[in-house]
Amino acid sequence: MTTHSNSRTTALGILALALLSPNAEAENRPRVLEEVVVTAQKSQQSLQDVPISISALSGDFMQDNAIGDLVAVSAYVPNVRVEFTSPSSPQVFIRGFGTNSFNPSFEPAVGLVQDEVFYGRPSYFSESMYDLARVEVLRGPQGTLFGKNTIAGVFNVSSQTVPAEEGSEGKLSYRDEEYGEQRLEAGVGYRFSPSLGLRLSAMKWQRDGRLENTKLERKEDDRDQDALRAKLNWQPSDRSELEFIAQQSVTRVNFWPRQLMKLDDDTRDYLQNFDPEIEDDPFNFQTSFNEDGKLYQRSDSLALRGSYDFGEVAGLSRLDTTAVIGLSWLDVEQRQDLDVSPADLLTLDEVDDYRQQTFEWRFSGAADSLFGLGGNVEFIGGLYYFQSDFRIIADIIAGQDIASYVLTKDAQQLLSGSSNVPGNPLAGTLAAILPQLTNLLQETDYYRFDYRQDTAATALFGQVSWDISEKWVLTPGLRLNRETKKSTPTGQGVCSNPLLPCITATLTGGQDYAPGEIERTETQLSPKLTLSYFLNDDISFFTSLSRGFKSGGVNAISFTGEQLEFEPEEAQSFELGLRSRWLDNSLQLNMTAYRMDFDDLQVLAFNGLLFDVTNAAAAFSEGIESEIQWLTPYTPLSINASLGYLRARYKKYENGPAPISDGIGAKQDLSGKRLAFAPELTATISPTLEYQLGNLLLRASMNIQHQGEHYTDTDLDDNTRIPDTTTVAANLTLRSDEQGWALTVGGKNLSDERSLNQVIDTAMFPGTYNPSQNPGRSVFASMSYQW
């Protein structure tokens, strides 16, 4: 069982405080929903006019609800799941498809774009979100305008802009939370003249770990994150603009936040020789492993955006051009206890080095008609270039207890591939004397993966929106992408005594291989066709067909050097959507029904130690996404809610991975079975009360979040099933809009729901699992000042 509910009554007093306030009289004010402006189609549009399944969270909303990363963002967005158990390997899923980056050559299925620059590694997802104007989540293939590796969707992030008027503006905020969590954020902008402005932003976040390591006698998952951003805006003329952005993010973590679960008797007896307190309760925030693990991640990015407004040219209006150049460097160093146990068995040392450069040049404009036919035409088109270099060196290092481990039942299962082998009672007895033998036989022993990859891609893209009539709009789009990857994978067992076999290579089945450079070239079309019908100014419908793809590649961490290549993944999507406002613009209801079909779906399969990349034959996802905003007739009360339903299944996957209990490398037929990381139901409801108290505003809000049960491993092992969970958060804010200050107190997971965010197989101990636990209850206080 992977969830335990506390019987305590949920603390809802902060809402009651506002309701019982004797002087809480609602101030008469217009009850009309504000227009939300997004850039989902690379131009500013009202969210209600965008024929895409999209959610948008404003920077103010994120500040009010203590949202500081994309994990917290995902809780408010239907059919989206994001987890950062490892900052270097985040898992991002939309509609059941996404990025599981335990294999570093696995391309993302969900794209990340910040300030118009695409970032090509999953590690960027785990960087903190600060001083933001807006986060948009686009569901479904977005290849036409955003390119490759957006087959499931896109997170489109926009930071705060430089002030438009002369003078200064800014915001300072500080939050203090239980477990030593502190977050300081600042954003200050100044417009020196009508043509020149600057904005500086900074964030510092730190948190003490909650996971007690009884072996090392320390807390695991302490995190420190620092980030800086500078944005310089220059407008040489009324028609031209240049903006330069420089930013840096640094993350430090002691690593990693995993526990043990389902220890069998033989494994428990063996590990008690190294830590008598060893246990396997996944809900007690306790673990035991011997390696002093750590992670260091740093990114540095530069971007230059230039635009020029031509005005009216040759019958075209609003004709402008925009060029965006992006450079980014990402470095990751990590060391982790691969077996997550107090025995010194295997340690993973990994260094990643990534560089990318991007260039996009596009034109957009409008015309009165399409060669005299129909009404208004809006168009956008351009070219795109992407180049990246990636290298990973990963060493799996044998520890001094590996010799005693070789005698265990677990080791025999790995070596034989069978789950039915007898235990060895001598394994524990010899645990104390064999380390010296290990050091004598092989002083140095490790298996090394050295993987290099150079990627170059070019694309041409275009999209046109044509008003066929006053009520009908047709939007076709197309992107032609050509990508070349040059990959050089190598695997090698290294040990100090050449007369004896390398222990790590023998145990893992690792072979020496060096096939040389493998070159792959892929040419893909990403078409899209959307038809919109505007019933009136408040209600519209749309239907769309689109296609996207995710690049193939070469397995970066193969132990054998066999079947290295995997094929690209393709998806076709059909959507039917509603955009509507009712009750004099006080109620907004947006809904999208969809069906996505995937061919050659890329999946990860556990090989007993790490994860291989393979292609499943076919899969589909279908469901509904809906969002409601309602300014109720009771003036102080407003309600936001979202609901996502998805049904994701393999259509055909006859040679899918079986649970490790069936034997190493065992297969099963997963045709018709569920996809992992795909909860059928996600829902949130967020009521908010606002009372005017003289010159002050009192705001009380609650957020109830529900996530349905789902699996967290491709093999659908029942031990990796996460039951459905419901959590409650609430906060109370007192704010002076006149003076610019705000004070907030609040709490997260108020019912102290104990749940897991992921369960995976444990390396080295077949039949045992590594869960990672969601945070328990916490309370916080924050203050902010804005001018």
Image: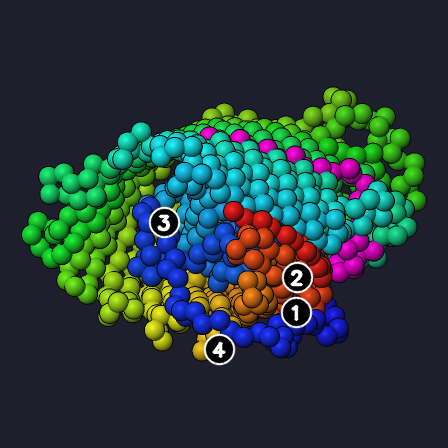
Badge 3 amino acid: Thr
The magenta-colored residue range is: 279-303
Q: Is residue 626 magenta?
A: no
Q: Secondary structure at mark 2?
A: strand
Q: Measure how far apart labels 2 and 3 are at the Cα level.
A: 32 Å
| Mark 2–mark 3 CB contact (< 8 Å) | no
Residue 39 numbered mark, or none: 3
Disc 2 target residue: 746
Q: Secondary structure at mark 1?
A: helix
Q: Residues within 10 Å of mark 3 (few under 14, many from 20)?
A: some
**Residue at (78, 38) in percent of width and height:** 291
Please tell me in which quadrant of the rendered image residue 498 appears: top right
Disc 4 target residue: 634
In the depicted structure, whether residue 363 falls above or below residue 22: above
Badge 1 amino acid: Ile
x, y percent for residue 491? 60, 30
| Mark 4–mark 2 CB contact (< 8 Å) | no
Badge 2 amino acid: Gly
Disc 1 target residue: 14
- Closer to the chain start, of discs 2 and 1, is 1
| Mark 4–mark 3 CB contact (< 8 Å) | no
Q: Measure how far apart labels 3 and 1 are at the Cα level.
A: 36 Å
